[in-house]
Image (cartoon, rainbow, N blue to C red):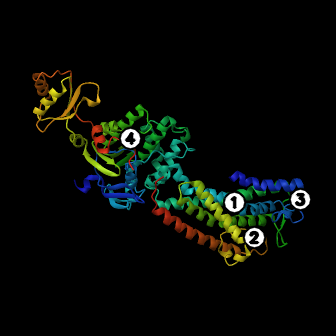
Amino acid sequence: MTTAELAIETRGLTKRFGTYAAVKSIDLSVPHGSVFGFLGPNGSGKTTTIRMLLGLASPTSGEARVLGSAMPRENASVLPRVGALVEGPGFYPYLSGADNLRRLDSADRYAPSRTRGARVADALERVGLSAAAGKKVKAYSLGMKQRLGIANALLTPRELLILDEPTNGLDPQGTREVRTLVRSLASQGTTIFVSSHLLAEIEQICTHAAVMSAGSLVAQGTLDELRAVGRPRVRVETPDVPLAAGVFGKLGMTVEATSAESAADELVAVFGDTTIEPDAIVTALVTAKVRVRGFAVETPSLEDRFVSLTGEGFNVDH
Amino acid sequence: MLAALAAVPILIAIAVRVTRAGSGGAGPAFLDRVENNGLFVVFVALGVCVPLFLPLTVGVVAGDTIAGEASNGTLRYLLIAPAGRIRLLAVKYVGSAAFCLAATLVVCIAGALIGFALFPSGSITILSGDTVSLADALGRSLLVALYVTVSLLGLSAIGLFMSTLTDVPVGAMAATIILSVASEVLDQLPQLDWLHPWLFSNYWLGFGDFLRDPISWANFGTNAWLQAGYIIVFGALAYGRFAAKDILS
């Protein structure tokens, strides 16, 4: 893919704080028009990467190009075309929601002041905050502040939206509205870069994704490419585990786990290189007099892939 | 803070009025003249506010400029708007300079109002012994206010620089106020005579020049150059620090 087709491109992007590397030489490629999910556990370097993309922090080494221009050198020409929500919303508590947006909009030299009022009202409308526009932000709930943060990113038409954890603190309804909003913006051609640790979220709205783990980029591609790495599995519930394992062996499948960890008698096997129809597997099992009590074919979810890439542990690495 | 500043001349005027203790030459400068003309409340109040109260409020405002935005989480949104880092610094500095002017004017206006309410107005005998008309005296008061405002600009630049060093506004405020006190303490030590002309607080109380005939502009000129020097040095330091700073707040 050529540079011109990428909305975000980084080469060897690295950020060190002292001796600790928060981001280790990552090569991101975000195509124009994609909804790009940026996944990773807490502390994996997602927000630091976003700060570098927005010119808030300068990379220790490597380069970042956003909308074709080098950051942070070309901040002034790139940033007006980018809307962003970084590490939660930040507003003046003693100003109303609408006044906060007006203040931030007037900080943007390129935003026309003539249309400011209309654009602020429109942005508030899009995130469902029109009714609370005149309320002071200190009276807002977390979810309302989050919505206001998204409204700020939508003040002017943007070519690229960078949304860091956009559904944080939102109720299920708000989450769904954000999904709808992202889809509608994407359908108008805006490239959307969403960071999240909520896989279900990403799976529902994204076309592409990348996975960060402990500062490194461990996977990147279209959602299908990422899922395809894991092979479908077959889960069989049976009292005749050894017998079934033998049948799987003959079919060229690898037995992955037996019932050691669960109470039910079951085993899991991974499909081999040759494609076998699930009904053929059942036939083979039954022919071999395996008593089949349950049978399921499981396609790996993004979550399985995510966990296999970033590890099971709950602890923040490093 | 502006209300607290306005309270200073009001308290002074009421104290003088109630106790009639203006004579004797004790207490702050010009205090004994208040009973002759209410306008002197302005100069007494400025004399009281300039060493401590005004630097305190300026330190709070200037120290809050960048660090306050950082602790609020709004700094990152201003920068990606994009406000431009130099532009943001300049706007913030102009804002604190405007506060210096507003703070001084509040003391002056409150002082003049309460002074004229409680004491005689009309023609006024100034420090050199000449008597000038009230209009002339009011003009001189405005010059005094300008002098005090200019005096505080160097401290504002120091506050702006301190504010770029931290994400904790209280730290920047405290550092700025401590520096202003330190400068005044050094100014009191005769052993450091050679240093005095370089201290930003050295000419703070020189506004009495405007209360003599003829008006002497020497202190005003020297003070203005000194403050300009502080603005350039600390403005450059603030820019150097802020332009390349990683915004992690």
Depicted A208 relative to depicted B220: above or below:
above
In which quarter of the view is residue B123 placed?
A: bottom right
In which quarter of the view is residue A36 placed?
A: top left
**Mark 1, residue position:** B54
The crowd level at tag 4 (other Cα within 10 Å; few <14, some 14-19, many 20+) is: few
Between the residue at mark 1 and the residue at mark 2, the CA separation in whole angstroms equals 20 Å
Q: Name which residue type carries label 2.
A: Phe
Q: Which of the two labelled residues, at mark 3 and mark 1, occupies the earlier sequence position?
A: 3
Q: Are marks 1 and 2 on the same chain?
A: yes
Between the residue at mark 2 and the residue at mark 3, the CA separation in whole angstroms equals 26 Å
Q: Name which residue type carries label 1.
A: Leu
Q: Which of the two labelled residues, at mark 1 and mark 2, occupies the earlier sequence position?
A: 1
Q: Name which residue type carries label 4.
A: Phe
In the image, taking residue B51 as reference, residue A209 lies left or right, namely: left
For the residues bearing labels 2 and 4, Cβ distance under 8 angstroms: no
Q: Chain of mark 1?
A: B
Q: Nearer the viewer, mark 2 or mark 4?
A: 4
**Residue B202 circle label:** none
**Residue A314 circle label:** 4
Between residues A148 and A189, which one lies in front from this camera angle?
A148
State the SS at label 4: loop
The crowd level at tag 3 (other Cα within 10 Å; few <14, some 14-19, many 20+) is: some
**Mark 2, residue position:** B210
Q: Is residue B221 visible?
A: no
State the SS at label 2: helix
Q: Is residue A227 visible?
A: yes
Depicted B226 relative to depicted A19: above or below:
below
Q: Residue A163's spot in the image, x, y percent?
A: 38, 45
Between residues B136 and B240, which one lies in front from this camera angle?
B240
